């Protein structure tokens, strides 16, 4: 069951309001639809960015704990093989 939508007020300046209205008209949508879509897209993008940031922090912590790493030249060679369509295993980590 979808959560009930509740109105929320935001304050925007007149220029932004006019820009939203112009774009909504050009897209044959309502300003309300356009603002909801903008918020949804922003949240999805920022949630992905935050997940990436958290993955990076976990990887850094794992590196600090184990020292496991792959040299840049090894990673570059592996990626070059993948780009050529070769299904090769990633290089082994060094401690």
Image (cartoon, rainbow, N blue to C red):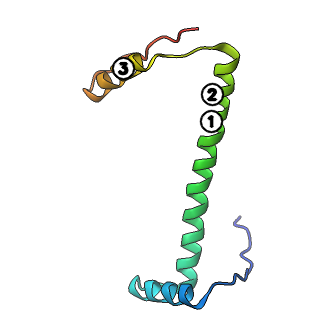
**Residue 27: which quarter of the image?**
bottom left
What kind of element bears circle 3?
helix
Residue 92 position, x and y percent, is 48, 10
Q: Residue at position x 59%, y 8% from top? A: 95
Q: Which residue is mark 2?
A: 59
The one nearer the camera, 16 or 52, is: 16
User: Of helix, strand and loop, which one carries label 2?
Assistant: helix
Badge 1: residue crowd in 10 Å (few <14, some 14–19, many ≥20): few
14 on left or right of 88 = right
Residue 55 has which mark?
1
Residue drawn at (67%, 30%), measured in percent from left and top?
58
- Residue 57 position in % (x across, y down): 66, 34
Cα separation, mark 3 vs mark 2, equals 20 Å
Q: In the rendered image, which quarter is residue 56 located in? A: top right
Q: Which residue is mark 3?
A: 78
Q: Earlier in the sequence, mark 1 or mark 3?
A: 1
Residue at image location 25% in from the left, 26% down from the top? 84
On screen, 2 above or below 65? below
Q: Residue furthest top?
A: 95
Question: Quick check: 79 left or right of 7?
Answer: left
In the rendered structure, are the residues bearing label 1 and label 2 in contact, judged by CB atoms less than 8 Å apart? yes
Residue 94 found in image quarter: top right
């Amino acid at each position: 069951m979808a959560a009930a939508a509740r109105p929320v007020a935001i304050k925007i300046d007149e220029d932004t309001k006019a820009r939203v209205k112009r774009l909504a008209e050009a897209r044959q949508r309502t300003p309300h639809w356009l603002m909801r879509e903008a918020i949804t897209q922003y949240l999805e993008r920022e949630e992905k960015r935050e997940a990436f940031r958290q993955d990076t922090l976990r990887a850094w912590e794992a590196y600090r704990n184990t020292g496991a790493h792959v040299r840049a030249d090894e990673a570059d060679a592996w990626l070059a093989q993948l780009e050529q369509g070769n299904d090769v295993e990633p290089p082994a980590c060094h401690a």
